[in-house]
Image: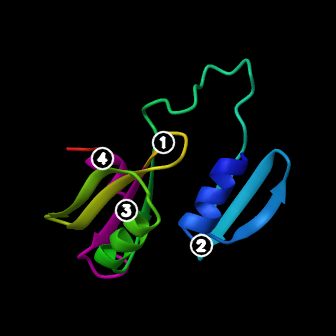
Amino acid sequence: MHRSTRFYKNILDLPIKTKSSDWVEFFTRDTTLALHPVKNKSKIKPGAGGVLVGFMVSDLESTSKILKHKKVKFFKELKSESFGKHAIIENPDGYLISIAEMKSKPGEEFDLLGLLGAE
């Protein structure tokens, strides 16, 4: 929890909304991201595939430069796509985080990020 909290707060600059020993919520605009530890008997394994959190940013090139300066591991380098620009980074536990800069106008976006994968 400590390592992940530090990553989302200090590296991705997400402000903490609430925090306890087993729950941390980050908030940015209309989005809340909650982290909590996996229970020992859970079938979910840290770093397991199948999960891709996505964020949209207004300037992906600048964001990528900042993340590289902070030594964030890129699973997929910034690439121009038909919908805009896209990159995928890894959090400290190996979970993938999709970051996109969309070409569409506000209100026209839809959730592409989970479908894009790591082509």
Describe the element under mark 3 as helix, strand or loop: strand
Q: Which of pointers 2 and 3 indicates the residue nearer the eye?
A: 3
Describe the element under mark 2 as helix, strand or loop: loop
User: Which amino acid lies under the numbered mark 4 shown in the image of this protein?
Assistant: Leu
Residue assigned mark 3: 99
Residue depicted at x 54% and y 40%: 93
Extent of the magenta region: 97-117
Residue 109 picture location, percent across and down? 34, 69
Residue 10 picture location, percent across and down? 61, 67
Asked if labels 3 and 2 touch by Cβ distance under 8 angstroms, the answer is no
Q: Which of pointers 1 and 2 indicates the residue nearer the eye?
A: 1
Residue 39 picture location, percent across and down? 75, 27
CA distance for labels 1 and 2? 22 Å
Q: Which mark is residue 34?
A: none
Residue depicted at x 25% and y 56%: 77
- First-in-chain label (4 vs 3): 3
User: Which amino acid lies under the numbered mark 2 shown in the image of this protein?
Assistant: Asp
Residue depicted at x 72% and y 67%: 16
Asked if labels 1 and 4 touch by Cβ distance under 8 angstroms, the answer is no
Describe the element under mark 4 as helix, strand or loop: helix
Residue assigned mark 2: 30
Q: Residues within 10 Å of mark 2 (few under 14, many from 20)?
A: few
CA distance for labels 4 and 2? 22 Å
